[in-house]
């Protein structure tokens, strides 16, 4: 993977190559602030599709970490509003992908 057209406010990101070969990225899809926190998926590491919004309320959602277990479950942790660490488990095979025309998150 390399540079993307996805917006990011100079915040931490994390990515993993899934068992099926796709890349999964956790990042803040904004140019300012630390909300929202999103998941995107790519077949080639260049063209991304929207997969999931983890957080979209006001606040700071940052420092994501992501891994995939042997059973295919994707585990994501991140700082939630600078108060605690949140943990999310996602079945990567059930993600519904949507186009991001021009690199922008669909409304």
Image (cartoon, grey):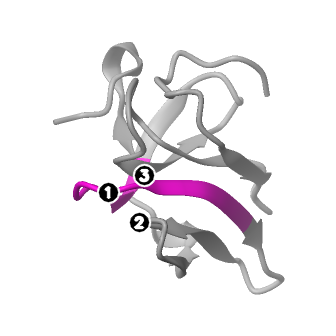
Which quarter of the rendering shows the C terminus?
Answer: top left
Provide residue 13's location: percent of width, then percent of height. 65, 44
**Magenta region, residue range:** 51-66
Provide residue 59's location: percent of width, then percent of height. 32, 57
Question: Does 19 lie within the magenta span?
Answer: no
State which tag comes first along the sequence, 2 or 1: 1
Specify whether 19 is left or right of 79: right
Q: On residue 59, which mark appears? A: 1
Specify whether 39 is left or right of 67: left
* Foreground disc of the pair 2, 3: 2
Residue 34 lies, with reference to residue 104, above or below; the image says below
Q: CA distance from mark 2 to mark 1?
A: 5 Å
Would you name the residue on which mark 3 appears? 37
Q: Quadrant of residue 62?
A: bottom right
Question: Does 54 lie within the magenta span?
Answer: yes
User: Which residue: 35% across, 47% down?
Assistant: 35
Q: Quadrant of residue 27?
A: top right
Would you name the residue on which mark 2 appears? 81
User: Which residue: 47% across, 42% down?
Assistant: 28
Query: Looking at the image, do the residues carrying marks 2 and 1 touch, with CB atoms under 8 Å apart?
Result: yes
């Amino acid at each position: 993977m390399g540079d993307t057209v996805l917006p990011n406010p100079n915040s931490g990101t994390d990515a993993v190559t899934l068992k099926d070969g796709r890349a999964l990225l956790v990042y803040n899809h904004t140019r300012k602030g630390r909300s929202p926190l999103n998941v995107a998926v790519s077949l080639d590491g260049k063209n991304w599709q929207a997969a999931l919004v983890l957080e979209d309320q006001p606040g700071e959602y940052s420092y994501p970490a992501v891994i995939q277990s042997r059973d295919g479950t994707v585990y994501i942790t991140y700082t939630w509003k600078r108060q605690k660490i949140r943990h999310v488990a996602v079945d990567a095979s059930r993600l519904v992908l949507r186009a991001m025309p021009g690199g922008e998150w669909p409304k």
